[in-house]
């Protein structure tokens, strides 16, 4: 029962008037803040300023003598493979270094599967009457956008505290050969913040699947993005798939977009040698190779995994206070009212808020009307359709603390306002 | 009539023995040279060394205030659009700045047309029983590889001195709606070196086509890559298409791969605003945006078109002597014998050599057997099949002059050797 439900009609009306008054005060401030996307702040970008000038005019050769300024090297320079094989816990032979976008690696892989099929496909996916992907939700809207764009049917899967509902997943993939993939953000998940348990990883790796070319799209976007010194540990799914006899099942994606520079990072794909050599062969039709100088820059700047980890502790020092502030304001403003619950992530870029059913769209609109743009309600679900209309993704990293405080005060006010309006409607007042 | 045909049997035999002896001397040298691809030399790359350190830790903002280190800007920063709009003679609204590879822009565009169709397509190309491209040949093997890879049927078109055989082109595109595209390298063409005449450009822009979504893939790869001070002028096909009432017909590609750094350049697409806005919308599903810092680097280093043109004169100073040497050796070794003819390009990266019919494959193999790798014979034709087996592409830019001399002496020797062997066979000697 919510605190609102306990109020009598008069109390509720008075409470509503007070909230409306506060909202009008916010409107008068003419705020213009944007918290819609998971974007690093200026301070975070400045941490990597050294990337801008770490190469000199005479420093352009890779360890194997490759002139990084020239053509070639479709799969990356050896030292970049070495570095990112540590980040993604794969061997350098199981790694391809891409351009600046892991999203492109994912899109291109699916586009290729559609047009030509994967190594173990019986036919290009586009020749099939239907292609379906499982979409644990709430999830990453850009994953879902790829599916929608390419006409892949999305099946929402519920999230539990430790990953997707595996019973649901196992039943579906065992029965339907048109299910070709599942989207996973397994660590500090976008937006729920959860990390998949060992049991979930093992079940994903071992479950019987009907489609021989089924793939787990393992977007390990936040693998080194911790907010605490004791982050949860994610099981190595490449190993688990090998052990389960399904070595080609998983495609692991990573990038430095939220490590170095969001627009000029390095994207990586890790998978079985079979998948990697297939990808490499196809990739060589599309490009002569990615930007090797940017790979060299990253190697010079970070050196090794320890360098990346030390760098990520600096990120945490900047963004943890933002997560703490956002959560503290929700606790102060909403605590004990049963109007919303929220994640307390140990890493990643988001806080996931669940409001009363049917309120999320209205809350986001109300917040926007007073000048604070949030991620569109529904964006975290396939086709933008949140069945309960109650999930809102918060992205607290970009705004400075003072702006974040204003935005969160407005947001929590709007949650109360819309919740009261719903209660008033229910009572037909 | 060749000089060989004029020799009597004994003379021919003696000539052959002398050639074989010279070939054996080459073999003894154990050469290891590669002239297979159009790759800039070390000296050329050094011209752009300043790109490596032209940004500082505080220089990361675009003219419009965009932080180039962060996410965003799927179509490029304003000053990069400005710069490349000059190079490709389009307005900044008709430009998208890509990543480091124009080949990727082409591949992605065709893959998108296959999966989803172009703005004026009746259906995605993959749903059609057949998709065909016209391939003026000899042409660029990587264009042909995209078609072959994606199952697009290639129709070879003969090259005249001023571009593709337009009578052949016009007849085909007017009659067959499955012909969706034509590949063109219109300036300093790869490998023939020709530049399309005004008449050819106008006919391409104006010709009636059966497919509403027909496109000219105008790979203007060598637009500023001149070897002389009086380069041929190429008509602006974007303007011509507009004037002919076919504004969406052409897709113009360019890159700085052979201007700045081959592996870390900037690729550009220019086309009608309709095509560009379509591309931008689709692109935003594939990536959040290309590397804007590398765009900023290019703007800082080159400033403007005049900067690029001045830079290209330095390239010419390095590579023209290589073209001159290669051609001089062919004139010395082969002149007046009627065993081969060769292009004398005014720009670009290649010399196109036509041998006696049926000899190209053998000549390339013979040259390789003595340690000099050339572009595979046939590579310049669709499916790698040169109908006359007589075209060989030379790429003289990469090797230093001394090595180029050895390679060309060996190559011209092999032309003579294989031609004599053919003549001997003919006489059944």
Image (cartoon, coloured by chain):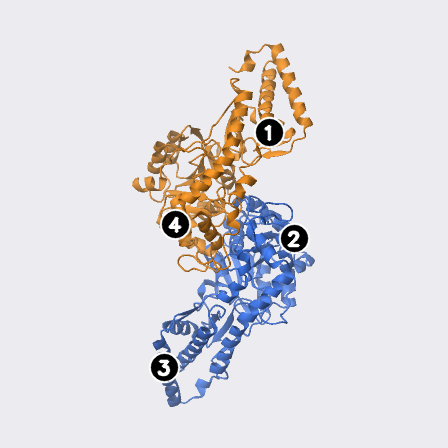
Chain colours: A orange, B blue
Q: Secondary structure at mark 2?
A: helix
| Residue topped by disc 4 | A82
Q: Which numbered disc, 4 or 3, marks the residue closer to the eye?
A: 4
| Residue topped by disc 1 | A407
**What is the chain letter for disc 2?**
B
| Residue topped by disc 2 | B92
Give the mark nearest the N terminus, 4 or 1: 4
Q: CA distance from mark 2 to mark 4?
A: 40 Å
**What is the chain letter for disc 4?**
A
What crowding class fits label 4: few (fewer than 14 Cα within 10 Å), some (14-19), or many (20 or more)? some
Q: CA distance from mark 1 to mark 2?
A: 37 Å
Q: Quadrant of the image for the C terminus of chain A?
A: top right
**What is the chain letter for disc 1?**
A
Q: Secondary structure at mark 4?
A: helix
Up/down of B110 relative to A349, above or below: below
The answer to whether A357 appears left or right of A268 in the picture is right
Q: Secondary structure at mark 1?
A: helix
Give the mark nearest the N terminus, 3 or 2: 3
Report if the CB atoms under discs 1 and 3 are less than 8 Å apart. Answer: no
């Amino acid at each position: 029962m919510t605190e609102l439900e306990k109020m009598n009609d008069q109390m509720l009306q008075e409470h509503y008037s007070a909230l409306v008054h506060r909202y009008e005060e916010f409107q008068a401030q003419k705020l213009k803040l944007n918290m819609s996307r998971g974007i690093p702040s200026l301070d975070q970008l400045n941490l990597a300023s050294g990337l801008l000038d770490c190469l000199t005019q005479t420093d352009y050769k890779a360890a194997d003598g490759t002139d990084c300024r020239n053509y070639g090297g479709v799969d990356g320079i050896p030292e970049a493979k070495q570095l990112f094989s540590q980040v993604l816990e794969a061997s350098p032979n199981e790694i391809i270094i891409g351009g600046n976008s892991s999203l492109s690696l994912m899109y291109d892989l699916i586009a290729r599967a559609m047009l030509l099929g994967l190594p173990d496909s019986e036919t290009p996916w586009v020749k099939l009457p239907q292609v379906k992907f499982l979409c644990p939700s709430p999830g990453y809207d850009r994953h879902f956008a790829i599916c929608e764009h390419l006409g892949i049917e999305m099946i929402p899967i519920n999230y539990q505290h430790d990953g997707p509902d595996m019973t649901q997943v196992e039943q579906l993939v065992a029965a339907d050969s048109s299910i070709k993939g599942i989207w996973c953000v397994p660590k500090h998940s976008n937006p729920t913040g959860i990390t998949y348990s060992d049991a979930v990883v093992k079940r994903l790796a071992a479950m019987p699947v009907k489609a021989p070319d089924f793939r787990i799209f393992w977007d390990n976007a936040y693998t080194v993005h911790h907010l605490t010194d004791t982050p949860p540990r994610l099981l190595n799914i490449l190993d688990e798939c090998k052990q389960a006899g399904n070595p080609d099942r998983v495609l692991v994606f990573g990038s430095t977009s939220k490590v170095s520079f969001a627009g000029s990072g390095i994207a990586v794909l890790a998978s079985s040698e079979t998948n990697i050599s297939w990808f490499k062969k196809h990739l060589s039709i599309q490009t002569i190779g990615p930007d090797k100088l940017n790979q060299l820059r990253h190697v010079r700047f970070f050196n090794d995994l320890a360098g990346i980890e030390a760098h990520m502790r600096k990120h945490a020092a900047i963004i943890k206070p933002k997560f703490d502030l956002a959560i503290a304001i929700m606790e102060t403003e909403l605590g004990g009212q049963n109007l919303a619950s929220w994640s307390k992530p140990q890493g990643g870029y988001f806080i996931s808020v669940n409001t009363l059913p049917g309120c999320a769209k209205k809350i986001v609109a109300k917040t926007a009307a007073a000048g604070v743009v949030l991620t569109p309600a529904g964006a975290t679900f396939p086709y933008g359709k949140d069945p309960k209309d109650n999930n809102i993704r918060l992205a607290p990293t970009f705004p400075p603390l003072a702006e974040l405080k204003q935005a969160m005060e407005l947001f929590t006010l709007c949650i109360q306002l819309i919740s009261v309006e719903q209660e008033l409607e229910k009572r037909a007042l």
